[in-house]
Amino acid sequence: MTDRDAARDAEAEDGVGVGADANADAGVDSVTLEVLRNACEAVAEEMNATLVRTGYSPNIKERQDCSTALFDADGEMVAQAETMPVHLGAMPYSVAAAVEAFPPETLSPGDSVLLNDPFRGGAHLPDLTLVTPVFDDRGRDDDGSGGADGVDGDGSPELLGFAANRAHHADIGGSTAGSVAADSTEIYQEGLRIPPVKLETGGAAGAVDDGAGGTADGGGSDGDAADVAAAEAAGEVRDDVLSMILANVRTPEERRGDLRAQIAANATGRRRLREVAREHGDDFAPALDAIKDYSERRMRAEIRDLPDGVYEFRDVLDDDGRGNTELAVNVTLEIDGDGVAVDFDGTAAQTDGPVNAVFAVTASATYYAVRCVTDPDIPPNHGCYRPIDIDAPAGTIVNPEPPAAVVGGNLETSQRVTDAVLGALAQAAPGAVAAAGQGTMNNVTFGGTDPRTGTPYAFYETQGGGFGGRAGGDGMDGVHVHMSNTLNTPAEVLETAYPLRVDRYELRPDSGGAGEHRGGLGLRRDIRVRGHTARFSLLADRHVSRPYGLAGGDDGANGAAYLVDDDGDDLEKLAAKHTRDLGDGDVVSVRTPGGGGYGDPADRDRDAVLRDLRLGKLTASAAADRYGVDDAE
């Protein structure tokens, strides 16, 4: 522990400095702190807007399956866009891996590092993370001195931080189109594995040619700014790396377009963060430290308000698709003063199927769950995670060893980790935790050759379901929950971009768990194959177990999947983890789980029951059985 850590812990123990004024010791006043904090968050949001607007695939531009964040020069997160929880808690591990592979002294303006390796900072292979260093362009003083004025003592530009983004690519190779194979047993089957590698290379900056074969100082800020700008302008995408990626995917032009969008997003972050640094001058770096310390103090104060104790909860994944069932996620959560320790001892050993979640994913889900029961206004950055300690035993489904298959760990196991940690926290903070949401992302992929163009295609989407009921309100219907915060693929976009058709898309009546506040309803979405043979994969869960209710509420309904006929009637039930070929005209019907109910169903307001009946969210038989309400009365 450093002296700074010890002082910070002592301050937290004394309950000192919860407010922004406590940053006076860092030389940053509270007004400057708030202005800079909001500026950094605005930069992250603008990065995300750039990524969505310039994205090529429907998965980016329509579903917004992407995230952006800013990091300081030490690689610690200082701001994020409010996007995908499963990305944001895990992205710091990607930045750390990029910095480990390419230390700051080896980076130049215009460089960017790309990676997706789950065992080197990634989450699963479809999520490509791009990390771009941001260098100061304020230049030297006339005496050539550097450091605080933008140039380090060795003449190189000063590193301000990093812009980073993560985007889910709809195909990254592997055995199945869409790269979310429900039947994979090792990571080699899941797609192209990219360790940290430079995707973009810039030029050297900080020294200019003196005209005699050597170098000399630029002599002033304008020259140094030009150096950095020229190095970035001279930067280019490495054709060898890009060609290697595009040669291993089914949809190379779509991948090229989405990678360009990621580059554009980080270019926006690089430009805007430099503007913020220029505006705040010497206060910039100390203020970033103060922002993190401020979040930590507020998080510790929130945890201190929770009752000390040890809380346990166990939930399960239905199976791994390879015959292994009831895979336990076991949580022992201890609150002690202003810290939280989460131990996953007793969780199932890593398994054959693709539901193993690397540690970064487990940490992301745990951080998210703790944030759910604390003040949502606490700035989300590295500081608010400091009070949370996580122990995930190696060789388990929450911290597997390579070459485990992991694509579904990011998608399905992350949801079960969230459910389990929230289940434990519900004992410490009753009323602050909602009943379980659908607990799955319902990953659907179709791939094949588009008969309209003769070119390969890969379609991927996750599907919404019910959110859990909560104290004071019903769960939301048909939404992506917890670790997924994406949108659906609009039917019009799906049918235009792919040789598929949406035959049916509706809420599932009665699927929300009964309660004083019922769970949200799941969805039914039927998709028809048109004019070709498609490879279909479903990676889902909660087809056996059910989303739990709280405070006397009932569990939500299971999910299910079927092949159906032209009238929508069930022909064949499909396993939750399932891969098969579908012919022209075949229709798959995916029904997603409802959320758990909250509170005793006997306490539900009669008018709320009648409203659900009127809106078709509840059938007459369910109203009578669950609530004792006769719609004829």
Image (cartoon, grey):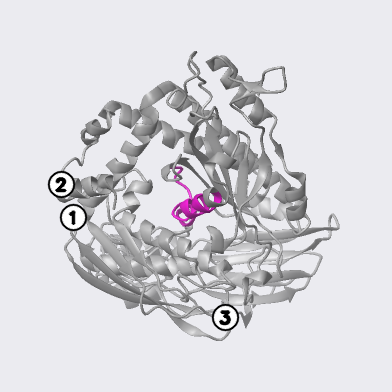
Residue 95 among magenta residues: yes
Measure how far apart labels 3 and 2 are at the Cα level.
47 Å
Measure how far apart labels 1 and 3 are at the Cα level.
41 Å
What's the amino acid at mark 1?
Answer: Arg
Which residue: 35% across, 64% down? 390
Q: Which mark is residue 142?
A: none
Q: Which mark is residue 15?
A: 2
Q: Quadrant of residue 429?
A: bottom left
Picture coordinates of residue 624 (x, y %)? Answer: 33, 75
Which residue: 45% across, 34% down? 42
Q: Is residue 365 above or below residue 175?
A: above
Left or right: 38, with 204 as reference point: left
Picture coordinates of residue 238 (x, y %)? Answer: 73, 43
| Mark positioned earlier in the residue sequence (3 or 2) | 2
Picture coordinates of residue 54 (x, y %)? Answer: 64, 39
Front tag of 3 and 2: 2
